Image (spheres, rainbow, N blue to C red):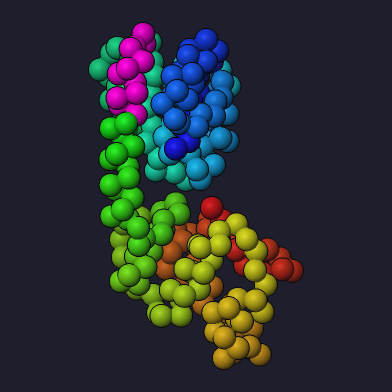
C-alpha cells in the first residue's frame, strides 16, 4: 500500500519513511500543504500522515481540501496536545490525531488500524461510485446528491455513470450517443443535450453554473473530478 507522509521536518519524514518502508509500505513524501493536496490526488494513496504546522498551506487547510476529492484515512501530527486542536482536526476531516513527539510503534499501529477499517469500508462500498457530493449506487441504480436520493430515468443514470466512470475525460456528443444509446438516436444530438440539462438540474447545486457536469465548448461533455 502507498502511504503519503507530509511534514516540513525533513529528519522526521526520513525516519517515518524508513520505518514504513521496512514494513513493506510504499512511501511518498512532501514538505508542505500544497504538496499534500497535489500528492493526495494519486488514486493509489491509501493513507495520509499530515503535519498541521507547515509552510505555504497548513495541515488543517490541506486536510479540508483533500476531503473535497478523497476519503482516504488521514492522521494529523501536531506539537500541540490541546483537546480543542484535536476536535478542530476532526472537524476538518481527520481520522486520527498524534501528538509530537510520538513513538513510531504507535504511529504504525494506528496506520494498521485505519487501513483495516478502510478496507472493510471499501468492501461495503464496492458497488458505489462517489465523486464530490454525487454518489451512484450501481446495484440499485440510485443517485444521491449530498446524501439525498435524486430520481433519475434509466438513460439519465446511464449517462452520469458513464461520465463518472471516465471522469475528466471529454467525450464528443457522437461518442456519448454511440456508447450509451448504441446508435438508437445517433442522428439526434439534441437527445443527449436534453439529458445533460436534466442531469444538471437534478445533481448540480447551481445548474446555471455546474461544478461537475461540464461542457468543453466545441468538443463535448465531461465530468470534472
Q: Where is residue 31 in the image (x, y as percent from the top left)?
A: 56, 20
Position of 131 with respect to 57 (left or right) is left
Q: Residue at x 52, y 10 (%)?
A: 11
Looking at the picture, tell me which residue is in the foreground, 170 or 145. 170
Position of 218 with respect to 33 (left or right) is right
Image height of 40 relative to 120, above or below:
above
Among the 4 quarters of the image, the one containing residue 124: bottom left
Q: Main secondary structure of the magenta part?
A: helix
Asked whether 3 falls inside the magenta stretch, the response is no
Q: Position of residue 47 (x, y in %)?
A: 41, 34
Give, as a single range, the part of the protein colored magenta.
Answer: 100-111
Q: Which residue is drawn at 41% across and 26% down?
A: 23
- Whether residue 89 is visible: no
Looking at the picture, tell me which residue is in the foreground, 90 or 99. 99
Asked whether 106 falls inside the magenta stretch, the response is yes
Among the 4 quarters of the image, the one containing residue 150: bottom left
Amino acid at each position: 500500500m502507498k502511504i503519503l507522509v507530509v511534514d516540513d521536518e525533513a529528519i522526521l519524514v526520513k525516519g517515518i519513511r524508513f520505518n514504513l518502508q521496512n514494513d513493506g509500505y510504499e512511501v511518498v513524501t512532501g514538505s508542505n500543504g500544497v504538496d499534500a493536496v497535489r500528492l493526495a490526488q494519486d488514486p493509489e494513496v491509501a493513507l495520509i500522515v499530515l503535519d498541521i504546522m507547515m509552510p505555504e498551506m497548513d495541515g488543517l487547510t490541506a486536510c479540508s481540501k483533500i476531503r473535497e476529492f478523497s476519503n482516504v484515512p488521514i492522521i494529523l501530527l501536531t506539537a500541540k496536545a490541546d483537546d480543542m486542536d484535536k476536535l478542530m482536526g476532526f472537524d476538518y476531516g481527520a481520522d486520527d490525531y498524534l501528538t509530537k513527539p510520538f513513538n513510531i510503534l504507535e504511529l504504525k499501529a494506528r496506520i494498521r488500524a485505519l487501513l483495516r477499517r478502510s478496507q472493510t469500508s471499501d468492501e461495503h462500498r464496492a458497488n458505489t461510485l462517489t465523486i464530490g457530493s454525487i454518489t451512484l449506487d450501481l446495484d440499485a441504480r440510485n443517485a444521491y446528491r449530498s446524501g439525498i436520493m435524486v430520481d433519475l430515468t434509466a438513460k439519465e443514470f446511464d449517462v452520469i455513470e458513464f461520465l463518472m466512470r471516465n471522469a475528466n475525460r471529454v467525450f464528443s456528443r457522437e461518442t456519448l450517443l454511440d456508447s450509451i444509446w448504441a446508435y438508437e438516436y445517433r442522428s439526434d444530438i439534441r437527445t443527449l443535450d436534453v439529458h445533460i440539462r436534466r442531469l444538471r438540474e437534478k445533481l448540480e447545486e447551481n445548474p446555471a453554473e455546474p461544478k461537475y457536469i461540464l461542457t468543453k465548448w466545441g468538443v463535448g461533455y465531461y465530468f470534472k473530478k
